[in-house]
Amino acid sequence: MPTNAERAQTLIHALPYIQKYAGKIVVIKYGGNAMIDEELKSAVMRDVVLLSLVGVKVVLVHGGGPEISDLLKKIGKKSEFVDGLRVTDGETIDVVQMVLAGKVNKTLVNLLHLAGGRAIGLSGMDGHMITAKKHSEAHGFVGDVVAVDTKPILDVLEKGYTPVISTLGVDDEGGIYNINADTAAAEIAGSLNAESMISMTDIAGLMRDPKDPTTLMPVVDISEVPALRREGVISGGMIPKVECCVEAIRQGVKKVFIIDGRVPHSIIIEMLTDEGIGTMFV
Amino acid sequence: MPTNAERAQTLIHALPYIQKYAGKIVVIKYGGNAMIDEELKSAVMRDVVLLSLVGVKVVLVHGGGPEISDLLKKIGKKSEFVDGLRVTDGETIDVVQMVLAGKVNKTLVNLLHLAGGRAIGLSGMDGHMITAKKHSEAHGFVGDVVAVDTKPILDVLEKGYTPVISTLGVDDEGGIYNINADTAAAEIAGSLNAESMISMTDIAGLMRDPKDPTTLMPVVDISEVPALRREGVISGGMIPKVECCVEAIRQGVKKVFIIDGRVPHSIIIEMLTDEGIGTMFV
Amino acid sequence: MPTNAERAQTLIHALPYIQKYAGKIVVIKYGGNAMIDEELKSAVMRDVVLLSLVGVKVVLVHGGGPEISDLLKKIGKKSEFVDGLRVTDGETIDVVQMVLAGKVNKTLVNLLHLAGGRAIGLSGMDGHMITAKKHSEAHGFVGDVVAVDTKPILDVLEKGYTPVISTLGVDDEGGIYNINADTAAAEIAGSLNAESMISMTDIAGLMRDPKDPTTLMPVVDISEVPALRREGVISGGMIPKVECCVEAIRQGVKKVFIIDGRVPHSIIIEMLTDEGIGTMFV
Amino acid sequence: MPTNAERAQTLIHALPYIQKYAGKIVVIKYGGNAMIDEELKSAVMRDVVLLSLVGVKVVLVHGGGPEISDLLKKIGKKSEFVDGLRVTDGETIDVVQMVLAGKVNKTLVNLLHLAGGRAIGLSGMDGHMITAKKHSEAHGFVGDVVAVDTKPILDVLEKGYTPVISTLGVDDEGGIYNINADTAAAEIAGSLNAESMISMTDIAGLMRDPKDPTTLMPVVDISEVPALRREGVISGGMIPKVECCVEAIRQGVKKVFIIDGRVPHSIIIEMLTDEGIGTMFV
Amino acid sequence: MPTNAERAQTLIHALPYIQKYAGKIVVIKYGGNAMIDEELKSAVMRDVVLLSLVGVKVVLVHGGGPEISDLLKKIGKKSEFVDGLRVTDGETIDVVQMVLAGKVNKTLVNLLHLAGGRAIGLSGMDGHMITAKKHSEAHGFVGDVVAVDTKPILDVLEKGYTPVISTLGVDDEGGIYNINADTAAAEIAGSLNAESMISMTDIAGLMRDPKDPTTLMPVVDISEVPALRREGVISGGMIPKVECCVEAIRQGVKKVFIIDGRVPHSIIIEMLTDEGIGTMFV
Amino acid sequence: MPTNAERAQTLIHALPYIQKYAGKIVVIKYGGNAMIDEELKSAVMRDVVLLSLVGVKVVLVHGGGPEISDLLKKIGKKSEFVDGLRVTDGETIDVVQMVLAGKVNKTLVNLLHLAGGRAIGLSGMDGHMITAKKHSEAHGFVGDVVAVDTKPILDVLEKGYTPVISTLGVDDEGGIYNINADTAAAEIAGSLNAESMISMTDIAGLMRDPKDPTTLMPVVDISEVPALRREGVISGGMIPKVECCVEAIRQGVKKVFIIDGRVPHSIIIEMLTDEGIGTMFV
């Protein structure tokens, strides 16, 4: 237990970091274990509220794969996968919409209020924010982002709420699409010219040897990424995650972080202390 | 088919009605057949967009009973009723939240955009808008409205969007409650000091003899309501609906209408033509 | 007599047209029979108020030739014409000023209020809005537009009034000039980057054969105008009117319409129904 | 010719007077000789522009009796008088409207711009500013003020223009009335809660002996007025003028001045030097 | 050295305290050892910047007794004291003004910028903020506060600066007075309806037995103060300090703290941790 | 003594000059005899207040050489000079800071309020307004301007105060520097894109023959300056003053004046009468 003097000291140490981010937009892609474990979830909520209070404009983007699978299972719907993506028919997209925009989104909004924040939940339909198109005929209602209208996000921020975003997209005929949350977060961060994007995952960061935590790469220049893929350092599930980081940097986000959502308050550690955790892409 | 001259004439006839409502808040409780029949639904969307364009500040409040029942059935959940209200356990309130805030709400938002409007979907969780408490221990997560914070609604209106509201409520411990949409609409309209509230139902209005449409009562003073209940004119499912109308008037709403949602564009007929349809409570 | 259902239908049909013009500036050059016939006049007033209510920023520009002639006759002043323009001496410009800025302008403002609108009458002197110079020594106080300061117009619009404009101009020595209302309207519309200009006349539009209404040309590209003049399709009094339309398009107005002011509510028919009347220049 | 040092001294002497009026509303009833003599007129214009520049919110209210008589004479219209008020039929009110709102008003606006100011001319019709009713059946379109809507005046002031007001009034059926300019100025000043009202006349002020300028009364408390009328000090044409001063004070105007419009720059002398001229009512 | 995880934990613990003060005005009376010791001074600067960043509107009020004595000594000026107050002649008030408004004030402003803040230094002369009157003829230019005009303070806060205030006062003849900083801080806090006032001193707080730190009284209701004075618990130099606390509470400040300025970051400990230090008056 | 009529005439004559400067920024470098002689000082204060009242945005920049020397002498500090600049050690810069920011600045602010104005005193530390660097190692804390942040000045102007500026500068390590007031005024005027800069001195202006006032040069184009220096017309103490004028013009100030501060109200004579005094650089 730190003494109050030590606590004050710690708060003061956070000063330069707070100054760095005050008034800036930070997009947090919230997912993985930190969204399932109740304690971790509650820690993330307090992290977001703290950041808002010290003047950071947090935009929270979430997915919800496991909850979607749960409900599909409950209604006895079998899932088919093509190229690793779930074939999404009309019934499935309904389930996706209900789980993401109804359950996960509003539950997060509710938790943010419990932690003392103020939030409004949005989906790509609200203000026609995320325009999407079909990824492929074969995948049905799986969408690629065509454009992000940042107005609803900025309107909500300006009125003093934390926008919480479900990554559903719409097309001009009213079609609704499920969009990968990492991809959507990168597009949203890029469109907002965010100061940084933080992607919460279930690994410690990019490691030269995934089995050896001492090989964690604290900083990666996106120009190194192709070589790292050839060398197999970036592989498997990390490939799309890293691609989103690269894309966000390309669209003008200054810094992108992959951090370990399993560590409590990893967002605060990354943003408000002198030692980054995870991997920063620049 | 009217000629264009006749069309122009009709538009001009709407002038005094438009003037009457311009800049005023009108709460529309959307439900019943008009929310199920695709053609009627599309007509309502265009009604709302037209009202917004002529300067009315529309707040759309919806329920979603049938869709809730559908999903409960799909997941094999049996419903128990006490005093006409569904006993709502934890699993059920999850379904309610998903259906209302995820499916019905966002689908309406999407349809409003298709009709040329701009909308943002809200629930009682967003901005901690609707504070609720348990209706009774027996009913579980069925809630009564404790307070409505109109700030999120007014913020969304001010930024130029039509707020679409799911009637879920929250308590200070994060509990989520299903609230009757008619009741919630009345509380919202009252809190907003709305110019009028329109309740869309599946009947022509209040009739002295429900079997004889010629006995429709165009205007009812709320002081007449107790007598009408004693006489049995207001009975069955009409009792709670009328109670909400009375409550809204008591809370300061100027006029409350029960209109027939089965008639296409009944909102426009009621608001922008010289002949009301349905029953107006004052 | 349409039923209310048909009325609602008509209002809904106007939706896309209202959306097209909402928030845009439309300059209406008001003149001809529609300014003399009391019933037509009253119809125009209601058209303007309706457009204002649905969000169009209407700027009403008027002339007043017949009323000027009336007063000149009453005071026993003979008029001399050179090249079709009235020779305007000091006494005549006084009469012009009184009739336009005093009688016609304020009467229109008054009528707009009677129709439920809010208006402020302006002349080129107000805010030194229209700078003019002598057209020629021979014509005396007949002016050509040198510049339009749109600030007074935009100020009046911003405060929620319909500006009604008399087309008098001033020079820097305080000289006052009578400016042709069509020309002034084109210059005003151009300076405002108006969405469209509507010129109300006493013909159905531009016709290949003026005696045959079936030869009405619904759309004319301004590049066709020189040929149409050579062919005699544009001749006589239509020449200056069409020149103003061409000028307005050149100055950046998107669409210019010549419509038949003798048809009641022709403005509404043109703007808010699916069938244009008259001729549109693009 | 003062030296520049003396000029600077004079400007500095004006400092406390400027401070006293900065940001305050002052209604100037402009009339009499100062409105006819070209040199005096030009002096008044410069006075108004100077006051505006030093931060006074000047509202200029004018009549125009002589010009009305001129035009009536020109069109060969005979005037009949009842109780000292001109019987005003439909043709006469047309002439009044043209002369006041068209000629006098816009000419003043033009002159203010020549003197370097910015002005917009208004009449009681603009923004439905002055609601009037018939003074008596016998007098036709002679009106009494029912209400002044100050919004158009304040809107014009806020946008940085000097409002110049013709004292015509309207009723809700569109009837137009000629209103005595002194009365209207008092009502306008009262409705605006003006700091002061200045009435320009052709006398030096209220004198105990009208033939002896040394008997000028510099200050009159309105409670003394009834006695002064009994004693005959206030008589003839001064009676209605003084009544308007009394009325303005009663409606909340702090100070009302009757000043000599025949003295060049009498407004500036009254407001910005240490020696009042004329009579101040408190 | 705490780990980063512990640091994050500490930051999160501060959340409810930050929420409590966000957007509120807190007046800090800065003085004593914390203003002399360079390290403590630098700690206070960082405390103020941190509070500003988390949304607290800090108003820093300072004295400067020791520096005044230093300069007086340097110029060879002897000080005479009456009733414990320095007799302040014209030469002395000049020295006071130079030291407070020139040296101490601007040095603090400079240090706040070095710590990453934004500040503007004000004295009672700026915006004629503190109106004062002579305390007594005998004391010369020692002043009592007559009124505080909060406009300059609020203007500076609104523009995003921390106001740093020297407690000099002025009278309407331009006389300048030295005002006790504790008294002035209490008056300023009261006039601003501050959420709290913090008075930094060189003791641990109010102690029943000044020699025994375990007898620190954490909370004192101002109604207890008279008894505590009678009992001698409040005595000597504490009397005026406590009087200022009582006065601030009486003028509407919610809570007033006497804290130990010798403890580094005592402001942060008091405001952002769960354990107060010093004594809180309510 | 002018009559009131003559006074009014003089005020009216000032009209075009007032119009020319209304809303414009004018930087006044206040110094020399006008800052020492009590009567002249009081005259300057009234000049500044008058200019503010007629809409000029005055920025008052002052030095304070004589007062600095006085205090240094009082504390027995000897001054050493190198190249005409005082060698400024740590003790000396403390004295400079106290005299400029504490004494001269706040006394001017106080006098402006006595004259009816509203002022806030700023130094280069406030809002970190003037960034400076060492002029040379030999001179110690004598600074050159690196950059002027105009935000604090504009913030103070926008809130309705006259900014009074002490020309102290700071570097990023917190070092404080004494900056020549003429140089700083030129840099401030340039950074503000001021309409004009007025430098008050103790000579009548630039004279071909300094002994013959009839050789005063009313206008000098800055391209003539090098020749005038070669010819010896600009020499001695005039060299740095003229260099500042040239620098201000180069940085975009429209007109720069050297005026005679020994003439009462010379600012008003220069700005608000038809005859300039002193020399204008363009």
Image: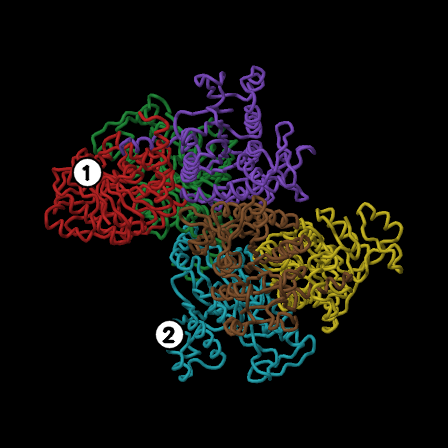
Chain colours: A purple, B brown, C yellow, D cyan, E red, F green
Q: Position of residue F228 (x, y in %)?
A: 48, 30
**Quadrant (top left/top right/bottom left/bottom right) for the N terminus of chain E:** top left
For mark 1, name the chain. E
The residue lying toward the viewer, choosing from E81 and C42, is C42
Q: Position of residue A103 (x, y in %)?
A: 52, 42
Label 2 resides on the chain identified as: D
Give left or right: position of C92 versus B167.
Answer: right
Residue F157 visible in image: yes
Looking at the image, residue E181 sits to the left or right of residue B274; the answer is left
Under circle 2, the secondary element is loop
Identify residue for label 2.
Answer: D221
Q: Nearer the viewer, residue A236 or B250?
A: A236
- Place residue E77 in its image quadrant: top left
Q: Amino acid at mark 2?
A: Asp
Q: Which residue is mark 1?
A: E204
In this picture, is C268 found above or below F256?
A: below
Q: What amino acid type should be assigned to the residue bearing mark 1?
A: Ala
| Circle 1 Cα neighbour tier, 10 Å, few/some/many (<14 / 14–19 / ≥20) | many
Position above or below: E222 against F77? below
Horizontal and vertical percent for residue F222?
50, 33
